[in-house]
């Protein structure tokens, strides 16, 4: 396994310092002991770490415990979710919904020193070919101007009441374009651009982004050639950052197989900062994807190399604790299974090897790049 880039450089610097000390000691003249070599410089990272508050069970105590444990090993809290369409379209104000559902939770995280990333999902987060489940249930569509206006109102309410540090106005846009009907993708483009204009007109200067799916950008999901994200950059001209979504275990058998330019090739043409806003590696075999706890831990080190290669702003994983599916008691889509073992801990909060690997990344000194 490759050592992280920062560690290789630290080793090289220490070796050079030791050689210099020995050379000076051999020059004579002083007769005393040589000064000891300075300690090796600490490994650093440009990227903040982030997790969500998604709990293993739908209980307030679990939400609070998840935030408490996450805050010990992150700088960011991410809220990444579909909109509360049912209440928005029933006439409840966006401000009232955000006040009811989010203000206390975000305040709890802020007290623990966490910054906030908020990502809006405009379609079905588990099936990019479809409208959001609540819209389907209501017989509505994001292609409707009234539905787009509800989204725009909700975005403004989140910005006013929660004051996110980063806002993602849509998620996995390239995968939506690949999988969904053209009118649905066009509606996502229209709504996100309108929301960006709304935010700027209201005086918000929060960095804005959409996320792209890395495996789709490489053509791996569609078993085709490399595609890139040029279309996304053209369709969302407000971008100040690129969000990355990556679940490489669905295409690679081992973390060492991931190409060194896996991220840099995707974001390079954008000449914009980037952050990983979702992803991970399963700790167990799910569906046809074989893995283990040790493989997941090795992915953490490999992932650090990838985010180092683009001097990322953040590395965010949505899931801290595996969900306890029995406790949720939901009828889940078939593909949900492949996302159930991504946590750093099990559903009882017992640590996997990945937690120690993550904590080692957190121990690296955070030295953010200056704004570009």
Image (cartoon, helix red, strand yellow):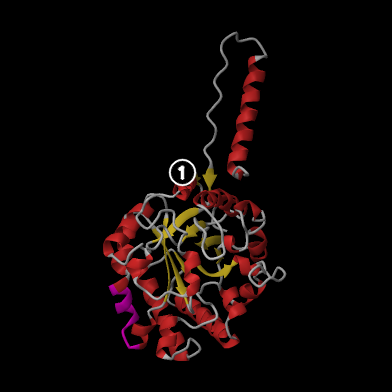
Q: Is residue 207 visible?
A: no
180 lies above or below 347: below
Q: 345 or 190: which is nearer to us?
A: 345
Up the image or down, 291 lies above or below 95; here it is above
Residue at 54%, 51% (x, y): give it.
Answer: 295
Residue 52 is situated, as x and y percent measured from the top left of the image, at 41, 62
- The one of 366 and 247 positioned closer to us in this rendering: 247
Classify residue 207 as left or right of residue 54. right
**Which of the 4 image quarters holds residue 152?**
bottom left
How far across and how far down the image is residue 6, in percent? 59, 42
Q: Is residue 27 magenta?
A: no
Residue 169 point in image, percent of width and height: 49, 74
Residue ID at (67%, 14%): 26
**Drawn side of residue 122 relative to residue 181, left or right:** left
Q: Quick check: 332 above or below 262?
A: below
Kindly state the secondary structure of the residue where label 1 is placed: helix
The answer to which of 73 and 192 lies nearer the viewer is 73
Report x, y in % for residue 179.
59, 79
| Secondary structure mainly formed by the magenta segment | helix
- Which residues lie in the magenta part? 90-100
Crowd rating for badge 1 (residues with CA inside 10 Å; few <14, some 14–19, many 20+): few
- Give the position of the N terminus as an image quadrant: top right
Report which residue position mark 1 lands on. Answer: 363
Quarter of the image containing the C terminus? bottom right
- Can residue 209 be spotted in the picture? yes
Asked if 214 appears above or below 231 in the picture, the reply is above
Task: Place residue 268 in its image quadrant.
Answer: bottom right
């Amino acid at each position: 396994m490759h050592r992280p880039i920062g560690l290789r450089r630290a080793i090289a610097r220490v070796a050079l310092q030791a050689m210099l000390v020995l050379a000076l000691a051999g020059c004579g003249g002083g007769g005393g002991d040589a000064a000891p070599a300075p300690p090796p410089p600490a490994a650093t990272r440009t990227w903040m770490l982030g997790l969500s508050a998604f709990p293993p069970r739908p209980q307030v105590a679990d939400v609070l415990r998840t935030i408490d444990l996450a805050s010990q090993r992150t700088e960011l809290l991410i809220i990444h979710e579909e909109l509360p369409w049912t209440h928005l379209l029933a006439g409840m104000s966006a401000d009232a919904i955000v006040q009811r559902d989010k203000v206390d939770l975000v305040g709890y995280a802020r007290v623990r020193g966490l910054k906030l990333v908020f990502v809006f999902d405009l379609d079905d987060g588990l099936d990019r070919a479809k409208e959001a489940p609540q819209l389907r249930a209501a017989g509505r569509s994001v292609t409707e101007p009234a539905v787009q206006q509800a989204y725009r109102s909700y975005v403004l309410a989140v910005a006013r009441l929660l004051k996110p540090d980063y806002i993602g106005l849509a998620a996995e846009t390239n995968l939506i374009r690949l999988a969904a009907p053209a009118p649905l993708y066009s509606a996502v483009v229209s709504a996100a651009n309108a929301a960006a204009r709304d935010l700027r007109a209201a005086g918000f200067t929060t960095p804005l982004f959409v996320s792209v799916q890395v495996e789709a950008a490489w053509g791996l999901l569609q078993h085709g050639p490399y595609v890139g994200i040029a279309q996304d950059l053209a369709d969302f001209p407000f971008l100040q950052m690129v969000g990355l979504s990556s679940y490489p275990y669905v295409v690679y058998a081992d973390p060492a197989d991931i190409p060194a330019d896996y991220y840099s090739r995707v974001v390079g043409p954008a000449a914009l900062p980037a952050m990983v806003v979702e992803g991970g590696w399963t700790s167990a075999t799910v569906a046809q994807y074989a893995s283990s706890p040790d493989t997941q831990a090795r992915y953490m080190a490999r992932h650090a190399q990838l985010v180092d290669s683009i001097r990322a702003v953040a590395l965010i994983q949505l899931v801290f604790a595996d969900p306890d599916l029995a406790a949720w008691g939901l009828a889940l889509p078939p593909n949900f299974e492949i996302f159930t073992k991504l946590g750093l801990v099990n559903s009882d909060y017992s640590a996997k090897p990945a937690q120690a690997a993550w904590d080692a990344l957190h121990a690296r000194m955070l030295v953010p790049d200056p704004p570009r």
